[in-house]
Image (tube, helix red, strand yellow):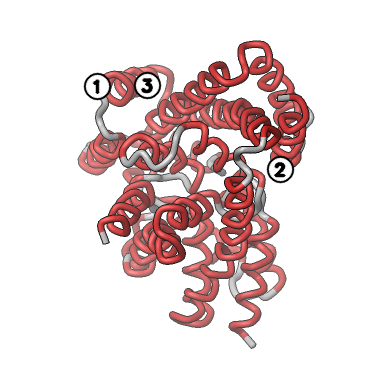
Amino acid sequence: MITYWQIFIAFFIPGIVGYGGGPASIPLVENEVVGRFGWMSVQQFSEMLAMANALPGPIATKMAGYIGFQQGGVLGAVVGVFATVAPSLILMIVLLSVLNKFKDSPKVKLMTALIRPTIAILLGGMAFSFFQTSYDGVGIWQTILLVVVSFILLEKVKLNPAFVIVFALAYGGIFL
Amino acid sequence: MTQWHIFIAFFRVGMLGYGGGPSSIPLVKKEVVEKYKWLDDEEFSNILALCNSLPGPIATKMAGYIGYRVAGLWGMVNAVLATIIPTIVIMILLLTFLASMSDQPWVQGMTRAVVPVVGVMLAVLTYEFLKKAKGGLGWVVMSILVVVSVLLIEVAGVHPAFLIGALLVYALVKPHKEKEQKEDEKVRGKMSL
């Protein structure tokens, strides 16, 4: 029972404070899952995030489903996904008439704008800890190689992230 | 028949949308506005604006609300499940398979190689968030918020939800000026994440 409650909390908080869609909630999920409850290491979280990025569909629910499943089986997955999806969805349906009036309100827009730097810092902090984990695991040269090549493929060649992840998996399987 | 159409529409969106919920917005539009004509262009833009102004994942809010509009409560449940279930199942199967092989050296190599790549993706996301923040808030406010966030979260170890909550409350109680509104609108137009 405690486990299910923790799963609920771990995904309820990112679902309710994560403005800007699924990707904005990645660092918030990491904070709960790695930082607070210690269910995963940074390495395991990045592995999961890589998979979530490579597969289609919303990021937040894939993370919630998988982590929930790992911690509490099928029911855990249901609890995780429910905690991610339900609060904001219910809010939306309930507040619809009110929101229709306020959706152009500068206050609502300011809310999204103001939390962006904080989300950026959270994302940056995660990126940093991922690079550090990689440096500890495979050393500086492999890390630089993988960072540079994947950056070029993602941002210059505009390759689909799924292919970049698959290439990285193949490279690691053979050479690392 | 409607329920079946709802299921197929959002199943396709879930299976074809790479890069998370926000990237599936155009796919939802294609199904809902162009293919099944459940909504017109304007209604769709309204729903999108609402989704953007509420917390939580975009894709499930859209699916849930559109499903609800078209076919009531069951339409909502149907649309949300069609969006998320297929990919969650694939994810659990793949990762469980990988975890069961985690003692193999080649699996360890795979997971090691993927860490820096995900780091790059997050760094790019960081940059995009900062760029948008600069556009909406200006250099000065953005820099102050960046420094405050670093100090509170990374140094003092405050839970990010408190900081975000405080910022949201501030946005609600702060008196508003005309000039900001225009700038906010500019950001809004660009917001796709």
For mark 2, give the secondary structure.
Answer: helix
Q: Marks 3 and 2, Cα distance to the nearest angstrom?
A: 31 Å
User: Which amino acid type corresponds to the residue marked 1 in the rendered image?
Assistant: Ala
Task: Report if the CB atoms under discs 3 and 1 are less than 8 Å apart.
Answer: no
- Horizontal side of residue B153 vs B73, given as left or right: left
Name the residue tied to disc 1. B156
Decide: few, some or many residues near mark 3? Use Cα within 10 Å; few <14, some 14-19, many ≥20: many
Name the residue tied to disc 2. A162
Quarter of the image with the C terminus of chain A in it: top right
For mark 3, give the secondary structure.
Answer: helix
Chain of the residue that carries numbered disc 3 in the rendered image: B
Both marks 2 and 1 on one chain? no
The residue located at (47%, 32%) in the rendering is A42
User: Which amino acid type corresponds to the residue marked 3 in the rendered image?
Assistant: Val
Chain of the residue that carries numbered disc 2 in the rendered image: A
Chain of the residue that carries numbered disc 1 in the rendered image: B
User: Residue B163's spot in the image, x, y percent?
Assistant: 27, 33
Name the residue tied to disc 3. B146
How many numbered discs, if any?
Answer: 3
Task: Report if the CB atoms under discs 2 and 1 are less than 8 Å apart.
Answer: no
Please identify, in this view, whether the residue under mark 3 or under mark 1 is nearer the observer. Answer: 1
User: Residue A175's spot in the image, x, y percent?
Assistant: 76, 25
Above or below, B80 relative to B20: below
User: Residue B9's spot in the image, x, y percent?
Assistant: 66, 71
User: Which amino acid type corresponds to the residue marked 2 in the rendered image?
Assistant: Ala
The mark that comes first in sequence, 3 or 1, is 3
Quarter of the image with the N terminus of chain A in it: bottom left
The residue located at (69%, 24%) in the rendering is A151
